[in-house]
Image (spheres, grey):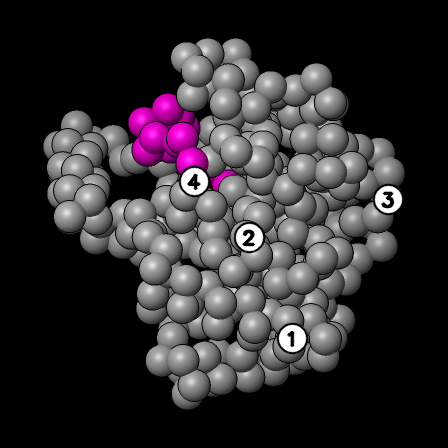
Amino acid sequence: MSKVVSDQADGLRNLMAQHSGMQAARVIALVGSSPRIGVTSVALNLAAALVQQGKEVLLLDEQGGARSATAMWAGAAARSWSDVAGGLPLSAAASRLACGALLLAVRQGDAPAVAEVRNLFQGQVILVDAGLDRDGALSPLAAQADDVVVVLRPQAASITAAYACIKQLHYAHALQRLRIMLNLAAGMPEAQRVLGNLAGAGSRYLGLALEPAGCVAEDPQLVRALGLKLSVVEAFQTSAAAIDFRRIAGQLLQWPRPVVNRNLDTV
């Protein structure tokens, strides 16, 4: 029953947004297929690329730890989603990054209390650097995403882990469509081969549409930018990786929206 009510509310919000000429923010959950895939770097660089294209962007950090976006770019004293749930305005709780995007931590225990995230952000795109639970399911916040993107690398272990991650997400949320992004690819032929093989396996064995979300070139400027505490999009605008992120950001804005927000439920 709650799912039906939620879908009706989402549909009403979409109709109201269309009537007023405004669209609710697009929510995209970025999921690393395994540790050290670079999903936090992907999230930051996409946020920077979207800001360069004139969009107001909110990056929600569910990762925690020393290598999280919050730890690296906002500091330990940064506020979190629980402050927003407690009544603090999002504009006061979030940190403004050098690239122009807003960053807000979502700490363990915050997510179950969240309301509809789109109601609290008036910008165009919300990126979630999503963490999965022990069953491979999204948090209630990340489960509000219009699109779930699984990020992987072009190595055998990462591809295997990505398929396992996709399978868990499929069964946890009854997903019929996911997107896959290749990070640190040596070249386009390799990227197309990996993405094509995964898409075939998803269709054949899971009945799941796996759509490409793009690929990012292996680029030494990524490491140099990280050392400067900047995105590669800001620091090295003509680098191969920066060009890829801007391309993906532009395409992301054109992805078809669901008829109504999925507001995924775990099963």
Q: CA distance from mark 1 to mark 2?
A: 18 Å
Question: Tag 4: Cα neighbours inside 10 Å, few (<14), some, or many (≥20)?
Answer: many
In front: mark 3 or mark 2? 2
As helix, strand or loop, the secondary structure at mark 2 comes to loop
Is residue 18 visible in the rendered structure shown here?
no
Q: Which residue is mark 3?
A: 224
Which residue corresponds to the image point at 74% horizontal and 31% vertical from the top-left? 71
Number of residues whose C-alpha sits closer than 10 Å to that of mark 1, classed few (under 14), some (14–19) or many (20 or more)? many
The spot of residue 158 in percent (x, y) is: 69, 71
N-term-proximal mark, 3 vs 1:
1
Upstream in sequence: badge 1 or badge 2: 2
Give the answer, above or below, for where 205 lies relative to 115: below
**Mark 3 or 4: the one toward you:** 4
- Answer with left or right where residue 28 lies relative to residue 257: right
Q: Which residue is mark 2?
A: 132
The magenta stretch spans which residues?
112-127
Residue type (three-letter) at the residue carrying disc 2: Leu
Q: Earlier in the sequence, mark 3 or mark 4?
A: 4
- Helix, strand or loop for disc 3: helix
- Image quadrant occupied by the C terminus: bottom left
Q: Which residue is mark 1?
A: 159
Q: Is residue 117 magenta?
A: yes
Residue furthest bottom in the image: 204
Residue underneath mark 4: 141
Mark 4 secondary-structure assignment: loop
Q: Amino acid at mark 4?
A: Leu
